[in-house]
Amino acid sequence: MTVPVQGWRRHFFYRKESVKTTWKLRAAILVVVIVVGVLTRLFWATQVAGSLVCAEDLTPSDAILVENFDPSYPVFQRAAALERAGIAPRILVPVESSAEPGVANAFSGGLAELMARRARLQNWEVIPINGIEPISLNAAAQIRDHLAADPIKSLIVVSPGFRSRRSALVYRAVLGDVGIHVHCVPVLVSQNPDRWTDTWHGIETVGQQFFKLQYYRFYVLPMFAWKAQSATAHRLDPLRNDSADKEQGSRAGAQRRRGAAKAQQEG
């Protein structure tokens, strides 16, 4: 509230009264928020964790992709179980590439081989991947290029649970453009969606995956779609120009023929 100043000073100064909260009120609000958060933890913790996990979509497919960016043995176990059940005949395992193009890094490839043998995978192969940011999107693009010559029309992505929703979004966006239908199988062994707030490691994992999911959902994937549309429009422009040139040429030819015919009639 503004309080007028008396005399000549009112032309140069004014006083203002304001109401501010005390530290006691701020502390009380903080306590209330913490108490409400603790009392409702079971509800919102389940909702947050559930938003990170894809809905299992298990359908017989041409191949299984084992997400191996953060190597996890349970993911290999789940892929092996699907292979033995006859869900898909091939297993694809992306690994870090070496300095030589198309060659897997010795450590990354060796670790994948160890887990594949332990899980008893049968028909599996590695796909060397360059770790270029954003890693998930660029890895999906490299896998798409690797599968360009293969008659694969459906793919099951076996992914760690809290990462699976982001993986499903990325692979469906990238592989869907080339006609590959993507299914998702999340692996939740030691990751309980209801108990992740019990440990600092669980809080770190869920928090990291939550913000990565939003980053991909609202920035990376829309940018990828925009670039794909721009590239398609750019490829179509020469065709449109060629069509326009041909149309103009045909019109000019028709005009010349009409002119020649008219000249003959006048002669």
Image (cartoon, grey):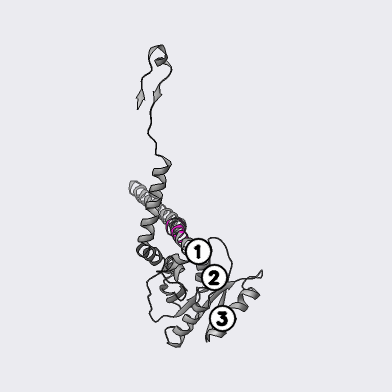
User: Label 2, on which residue?
Assistant: 70
Q: Amino acid at mark 1?
A: Trp
Say if the magenta span includes residue 224.
Answer: no
Residue depth check, mark 3 versus mark 1: number of the one nearer the observer: 1
Q: Amino acid at mark 2?
A: Asp
Q: Quadrant of residue 182?
A: bottom left
What SS does tag 2 mark?
Answer: loop
What SS does tag 1 mark?
Answer: helix
Q: Amino acid at mark 3?
A: Met
User: Label 3, on which residue?
Assistant: 115
Residue 231 in the image: x percent, y percent? 47, 58
What SS does tag 3 mark?
Answer: helix
Which residues lie in the magenta part? 211-219
24 with respect to 148 (left or right): left
Label placed on residue 119:
none
Outermost residue on the front side: it is 24
